Amino acid sequence: MNVTLASEQSAEQNAEPTTSEQPAATEVTAEVAAEVAVEVVAEVVVETPPVATPAHFEQHASNELMRHIPSLAWLCEKLDGDMRRRIDRISASTEGHVTPEIEEELRALSRALDRLADAAKHIRNNGHGPNEPLPKLRWSLNHALSCLRLADAATFARRAPLHTFERSKSEAIYGAFLVVIDHLGRVLDVVRPIDPGIDERLYEGLVKFEEPMREQPIA
């Protein structure tokens, strides 16, 4: 009887450590599972593909300047300064005796100025101006100058972006400007037989002496 009780007590004592070790084993298992979950999440985050960035396109205003195109300010100054002065002197020389040949060249110059205005503005909504050649010429000059001043100075004379597959608008404007200069020279060619002193008046005021020249000859 005593032997049976002793054996039962020893069995209970041997079983008690196993029940006390169960919470510790459970805690270790939970910690290992949490570490594995963190590693899996980290691996998933690292393996996520990067977000695609949009393609880079050229900006017209940041492109390089074209060396064969002058600035917009120079074109406006040339048209409003030197060319206006030349047209005023030609108009004063031909006022009252416009021949058919001169009229033809004056109208061609007016059309060249209108094409310059079209190249700068792309639209024409200001009518056709007067019908007479000289008033029409002055009107076309003012119209071309106003359209040229409305052009975008930030993108003028800069290369057009490659992805647009278009030419720069500045090249068309400068080409039309060169045509105006050529037609102005043709007008002078037909005005010289009528007014031989037109060139002297055109160059008048370009050079000014600090001291006036002597009226008497040196020798």
Image: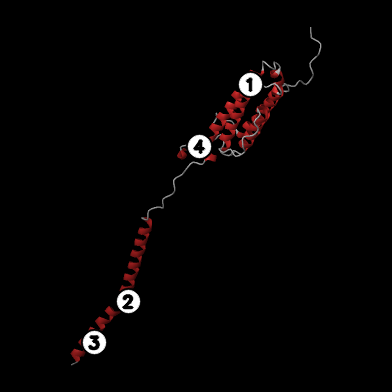
* Residue receiving disc 3: 9
The disc, 2 or 4, on the residue closer to the chain's N-terminal end is 2
Which mark is nearer the camera, 4 or 3? Answer: 4
Task: Please tell me which residue is depicted at 69% across the width and 25% down the height of the picture.
Answer: 91
Task: Please tell me which residue is depicted at 70% across the width and 26% down the height of the picture.
Answer: 88
- Few, some or many C-alpha atoms within 10 Å of disc 4 (few <14, some 14-19, many ≥20)? many
- Whether the residues at callouts 1 and 3 have beta carbons within 8 Å, the answer is no
Q: How many marks?
A: 4
Between the C-alphas of marks 2 and 4, the distance is 75 Å
The disc, 2 or 1, on the residue closer to the chain's N-terminal end is 2
Badge 3 marks a residue whose secondary structure is: helix
The disc, 2 or 3, on the residue closer to the chain's N-terminal end is 3
* Residue receiving disc 1: 100
Q: Quadrant of residue 163?
A: top left
- Whether the residues at callouts 4 and 3 have beta carbons within 8 Å, the answer is no
Between the C-alphas of marks 1 and 3, the distance is 141 Å
Q: Closer to the camera, 148 or 137? A: 137
- The circle drawn on residue 86 is none
Question: Measured from the top left, where is residue 32 in percent x and y?
Answer: 33, 67
- The circle drawn on residue 23 is 2
Between the C-alphas of marks 2 and 3, the distance is 24 Å
Residue type at the position of mark 4: Ala
